[in-house]
Amino acid sequence: MSTELIRTIDEAHGLAIQVANYQTISWQLAQDYRDAVEVLRRLGVTADLALLAAQPPAGIRGSVTEVRPGGVVEISIGSDSGLARGHHLDIVRNRDGRSSYIGKIELTNVTADRAVGRVMPEFRRGVVQRNDEVTFIDVHEFVAH
């Protein structure tokens, strides 16, 4: 019983160290956030945090796995990749070393590893096909440079 007690105490000490490390990281992230907001304020840049939270993660990549009637598209990534219902993703076709913008979808249903979206007619530039790439093109990134 004393061996088990010692092992439990060691585990508790290890967990206490982990908690302290996470608290330090949390404090540093909060400080970094405050510093970033201050820099943006000084530069005269205002950020709509609700808009940023509503965007898919930067660098996200997936592919079209199924095209259904009515402009419905199933893709290979989901909430495990940071997607949520309402996100807008761009569809690009890469063939022979060239990329073509096909359109944009709005996600209507998201599971852990899949999502379903509807093609947004106002952004349609071609017919979506299976294996087209799904990504998020942040136009603000291009405007800022």
Image (tube, rainbow, N blue to C red):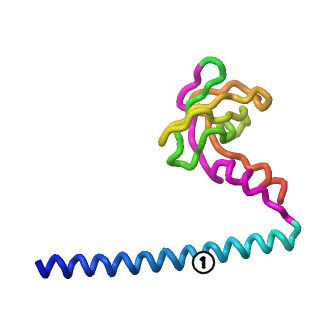
The N terminus - image quarter:
bottom left
- Can you give x and y, in whole percent of width and height, for residue 37 in the image? 76, 70
Residue 133 position within the rendered picture, expressed as x and y whole percent measured from the top left: 61, 38
Q: Which residues are magenta?
A: 45-68
Q: Is residue 5 above or below residue 101?
A: below
With respect to residue 13, does 96 lie above or below? Answer: above
The reply, left or right, for residue 15 in relation to residue 140 is left
Residue 57 forms part of the magenta stretch? yes
Q: Which image quarter: residue 11?
A: bottom left
The outermost residue toward the top is 69
Residue occupying image coordinates x 21% and y 78%: 7
Dot 1 crowding, Cα within 10 Å, few <14, some 14–19, many 20+: few
Q: Residue at x 63, y 73 (%)?
A: 30
Location of residue 17 by image quarter? bottom left
User: Magenta includes 112?
Assistant: no
* Residue type (three-letter) at the residue carrying disc 1: Gln
Residue sticking out furthest to the right: 44
Q: Is residue 1 left or right of residue 83?
A: left
The number of callouts visible is 1
99 or 76, nearer to the observer = 76
106 is higher (above) or lower (below) than 129:
below
Instruction: Classify the position of the C terminus by image quarter.
Output: bottom right
Viewer-nearest residue: 145 or 86: 86
Residue at 86% x, 73% y: name it: 42
Query: Which residue is label 1 attached to?
Result: 28
Name the secondary structure under disc 1.
Answer: helix
- Between residue 136 and residue 26, name the one nearer to us: 26
| Residue found 66% across the figure and 39% down from its top | 86
Residue 55 x/y as whole percent: 68, 48
The one of 133 and 110 positioned closer to us in this rendering: 110
